[in-house]
Amino acid sequence: MSPSPRSTLQMRKELVRLRMEMQRQQLDYHAEPLRHPLRQFGNLFAPSRARPGKGTPLAVGAALLLTLFGKRLGRFRKLALFALEVYPLVSAGLRQYRETRPPKPPQVSPKTQA
């Protein structure tokens, strides 16, 4: 039993409406940096915990230097590119490790025991 032509037409209209809404949201998301460039620039130098997943100023500086002088690095260019790609992952892993491990108990020096 096939659905009526009217319900098929309404389903297509709803699908088109949902697609248009999705495209509108994508445009809003990608236009945000253009609408507020100073906010984006300020977020660049904010503490890394306030903006997880973003590049640190060190990584941004390294990317800029690699862009400017990458061809002069020769064979080491690929290694530098790899290091720049892996840096956020290693940084996030270290941060998570430091936050989840229990604090060390204070160590007593041998002089205070006597």
Image (cartoon, grey):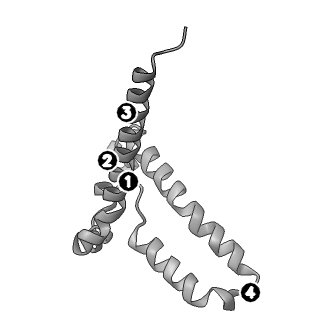
SS label for mark 1: helix
SS label for mark 2: helix
Please state which of the two labelled residues, at mark 1 or mark 2, is closer to the viewer: 1
CA separation in Å, label 4 and label 1: 39 Å
| Amino acid under disc 3 | Glu
SS label for mark 3: helix
CA separation in Å, label 4 and label 2: 57 Å
| Amino acid under disc 1 | Gln
| Amino acid under disc 2 | Thr
Q: Residue tagged by mark 3?
A: 14
Q: Residue tagged by mark 2?
A: 112
Please state which of the two labelled residues, at mark 4 or mark 1, is closer to the viewer: 1
**Mark before the other along the chain sequence, 4 or 2:** 4
Q: Look at 60% across and 90% down and name the residue there.
A: 69
Q: Look at 37% across and 33% down and name the residue there.
A: 14
Res 104 → quadrant: top left
Residue 37: x percent and y percent?
26, 74
Please state which of the two labelled residues, at mark 4 or mark 2, is closer to the viewer: 4
**Vertical position of residue 49 compared to residue 74: above or below:** above
SS label for mark 4: loop
**Mark before the other along the chain sequence, 1 or 3:** 3
CA separation in Å, label 4 and label 3: 55 Å
CA separation in Å, label 1 and label 3: 18 Å
